[in-house]
Amino acid sequence: MISVRFRIFPDDVDEFLTETNSDNDYLLKAYGIPAEYALTQHQCLLIDLDAYMYQDAMVIDGEYMNNGLHLKIACLPDTHHDNSVIHFALPIPDDLILEPENCTADYLILTDETEYQALVTNSLTIELHEQEGLQ
């Protein structure tokens, strides 16, 4: 009932922009990217969450290891919604190598809106783990 797709902007999005006849303004609005974030100078991980029967979702935790990101996403079900696509964007530090094919997600399904709202924050901390064999 939930699937996720990861892409790197600007590298992996050229095809997406061509398909939708869109531009950077669309990305800024759809993914909630602040206008002051220079998309032409810094990479961003775009996350598309296809959430059937969910009214809301948010990234609540993450770990980086082996050029990939493992996210924990909290979801709030709603039987009144059919299919939602929820967009997230995470800025990627310039010195970090991130491969979308190495990105994964686990989902925390919450049925209590108060519990869900208690997890809402304006920031996200990603744990960085050293790669095995590297010093």
Image (cartoon, grey):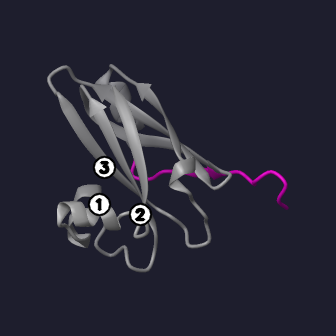
Q: Amino acid at mark 1?
A: Phe
Res 37 → quadrant: bottom left
Amino acid found under the numbered disc labelled 2: Asp
Mark 1 closeness class: few <14, some 14–19, many ≥20 residues within 10 Å: few
Name the secondary structure under disc 2.
loop
Q: Is residue 62 left or right of residue 78?
A: right
Q: Secondary structure at mark 1?
A: helix
Q: Badge 3: how crowded within 10 Å, few (<14), some, or many (20+)?
A: some
Question: According to the image, label 2 marks what residue?
Answer: 12
| Residue at x 51%, y 64% (from the top left corner) | 92
Q: Earlier in the sequence, mark 1 or mark 3?
A: 1
For badge 3, the amino acid type reads: His
Read off the residue under disc 1.
Answer: 16
Q: Is residue 15 something one can see in this rendering?
A: yes
Q: How many other residues sit within 10 Å of disc 2, few (<14), some (14-19) or many (≥20)?
A: some
Magenta highlight range = 121-135
Q: Which residue is mark 3?
A: 87
- State the mark number for residue 51: none
Q: Closer to the camera: disc 3 or disc 2?
A: 2
Residue 75, above or below 131: above
Residue 90 occupies quadrant: bottom left
Q: Are marks 2 and 1 in contact (CB under 8 Å)?
A: yes
> Alpha carbon of mark 3 to alpha carbon of mark 2: how far?
16 Å
Tell me if residue 126 is in the magenta stretch. Answer: yes
**Looking at the picture, how far across and down is residue 88, in whole percent?**
35, 51
Q: Is residue 60 left or right of residue 84?
A: right
Q: Is residue 128 magenta?
A: yes
Q: Residue 16's quadrant in the figure?
A: bottom left
- Distance from disc 1 to disc 3, alpha carbons, whole Å, reads 14 Å
| Observer-nearest of 32 and 12 | 12
What residue lies at 33% left-to-right and 68% top-to-bottom?
14
> Percent from the top left, x then y, of residue 62?
55, 45
